[in-house]
């Protein structure tokens, strides 16, 4: 009977190996796609602030610009374009 037990053990090992080989392998995590940087221009900010002025009024836009120490759009430093754009889009519900 030991010969039959050895055969059964070998068959179990083969079955285990087949299961391991046929099991779906874990795929390597996908590397995130890096999108090209988007340049926010004065025109982009102007367009967004125009929409905001139509929705909430010019006073609201002036207050937003004042938060960034600008009395008018041309006084806004380029380093603040992204922040102002995000703030305007958030107020418009486009966040």
Image (spheres, rainbow, N blue to C red):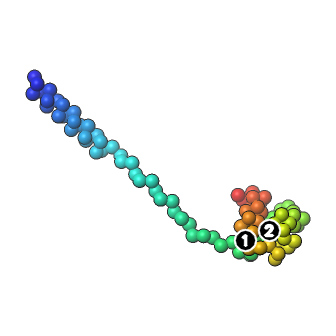
Q: Which residue sits at x=78%, y=58%? A: 91
Q: Which residue lies furthest to the right in this view?
A: 59
In front: 69, or 35? 69
Crowding around mark 2 (Cα neighbors within 10 Å: few <14, some 14 to 19, many 20+) is many
- Of the 4 image quadrants, the one containing the C terminus is bottom right
Crowding around mark 1 (Cα neighbors within 10 Å: few <14, some 14 to 19, many 20+) is few
Residue 19 picture quarter: top left
Q: In this view, does 40 lie above or below 94?
A: below
> Where in the figure is residue 44, as x and y percent of width and height?
72, 72
> For numbered disc 1, what is the local secondary structure?
helix
Q: Is residue 54 left or right of residue 32?
A: right
Q: Which residue sits at x=9%, y=27%? A: 3
- Of the 4 image quadrants, the one containing the N terminus is top left
Residue 78 picture quarter: bottom right
If you read the primary sequence from the N terminus, does the residue marked by circle 2 or circle 1 appear first? 2
Q: Which residue sits at x=90%, y=65%? A: 59
- Asked if residue 12 can be seen in this view, the reply is yes
Label 2 – label 1 distance at C-alpha: 16 Å
In front: 49, or 10? 10
Q: Is residue 38 left or right of residue 83?
A: left
> For numbered disc 2, what is the local secondary structure?
helix
Q: Are marks 2 and 1 in contact (CB under 8 Å)?
A: no
Q: In this view, does 63 lie to the left or right of 21?
A: right
Residue underneath mark 2: 49
Residue underneath mark 1: 79
> Where in the figure is residue 11, as x and y percent of width and height?
18, 34
Viewer-nearest of discs 2 and 1: 1
């Amino acid at each position: 009977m030991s010969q039959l037990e050895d055969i059964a053990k070998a068959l179990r090992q083969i079955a285990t190996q087949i299961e391991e080989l046929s099991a779906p392998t874990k795929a390597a995590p996908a590397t995130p796609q890096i999108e090209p940087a988007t340049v926010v221009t004065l025109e982009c900010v102007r367009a967004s602030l125009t929409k905001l002025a139509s929705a909430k009024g010019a006073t609201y836009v002036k207050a937003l610009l004042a938060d960034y120490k600008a009395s008018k759009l041309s006084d806004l430093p380029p380093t603040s374009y992204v922040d102002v754009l995000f703030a305007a889009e958030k107020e418009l519900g486009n966040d």
